[in-house]
Amino acid sequence: MVARINYITPEEYLALERKAEYKSEYVDGVMYAMAGGSPEHNLIASNVLAEIHFQLKSSPCQVYNSDMKVRVPSLRKFHYPDVTVVCDKPQFGDDERDVLLNPLLLVEVLSENTAAFDRGKKFQYYQEIESFQEYLLVAQDEPVVERFVKQTDGSWIYTKVEGLDKSVELVTIDCRLGLTDIYAKVL
């Protein structure tokens, strides 16, 4: 017996999601409930957000936490990155202003259950967003940050930074994050 999947439209997803008590992402007609993050996941995401926000406080850029949905242009995918940065005027999906269309930088804190998806399909989906230029993947269990930066020819350059004595340059927003700051109170 094959499980039946009830497909819903993007509009139906948004109507349900806006009333839901828990978050769900949406991919091609299917809602996927999101598991709650571990204490380490939440601290790391908060640390990254705080450091970026502090460094950008005098810039026109805006930093959003994981409550901001990001829509992939196909209209068939909505995700909740852990941290989102937009430096142009934010473009929203509608008057609710809870779906961002033009992120520049996206950050995902990796968990055992989501790491493969965040590195693979989700990264592919995000690449459909024209404004998207930089992607940061942050490990939870060791001081490792992976960074992807989009080049003018559309290719992506990968850099891996390891160790609490290192820092990662976020070239699209002119920020530097020390891994000791990212992992404060975690490692």
Image (tube, rainbow, N blue to C red):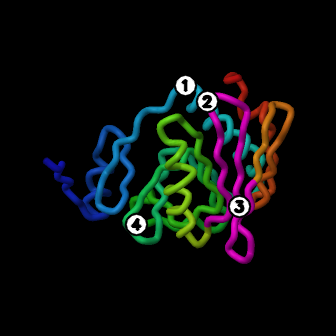
Residue that label 4 marks: 94
Q: Residues within 10 Å of mark 4 (few under 14, many from 20)?
A: few
User: What label does residue 43 carry, if any?
Assistant: 2
Badge 1: few (under 14), some or many (20 or more) residues near its Cα, within 10 Å?
A: few
User: Which sits earlier in the primary sequence, circle 1 or circle 4?
Assistant: 1
Precedes in sequence: disc 2 or disc 4:
2
Nearest to the observer: residue 113 or residue 105 = 113
Identify the mark nearer the N-term, 3 or 1.
1
- What whole-number distance in Å separates the C-alpha atoms at marks 1 and 4? 33 Å
Which residue shows up at 13% across the image and 47% down it? 1
* Residue 108 x/y as whole percent: 58, 46
Q: Earlier in the sequence, mark 3 or mark 2?
A: 2
Residue 135 is situated, as x and y percent measured from the top left of the image, at 65, 55
Q: What's the residue type where badge 1 is placed?
A: Pro
Q: Secondary structure at mark 2?
A: helix
From mark 4 to mark 3, how far is it between C-alphas?
22 Å
Rendered image: mark on residue 91: none
Residue at figure coordinates x 17%, y 52% from the top left: 4
Query: Residues under labels 2 and 4: Cα distance?
Result: 31 Å
Q: Is residue 95 above or below residue 58?
A: below
Q: Are marks 1 and 2 in contact (CB under 8 Å)?
A: yes
User: Which residues make up the magenta segment?
Assistant: 132-158
168 to the left or right of 48: right
Residue type at numbered disc 3? Pro
Along the horizontal axis of the image, is 2 left or right of 114? left
For label 3, the residue is 60
Q: Nearer the viewer, residue 98 or 176?
A: 176
- Tell me the distance, in whole angstroms, between the alpha carbons under discs 3 and 1: 31 Å
Residue assigned mark 1: 39
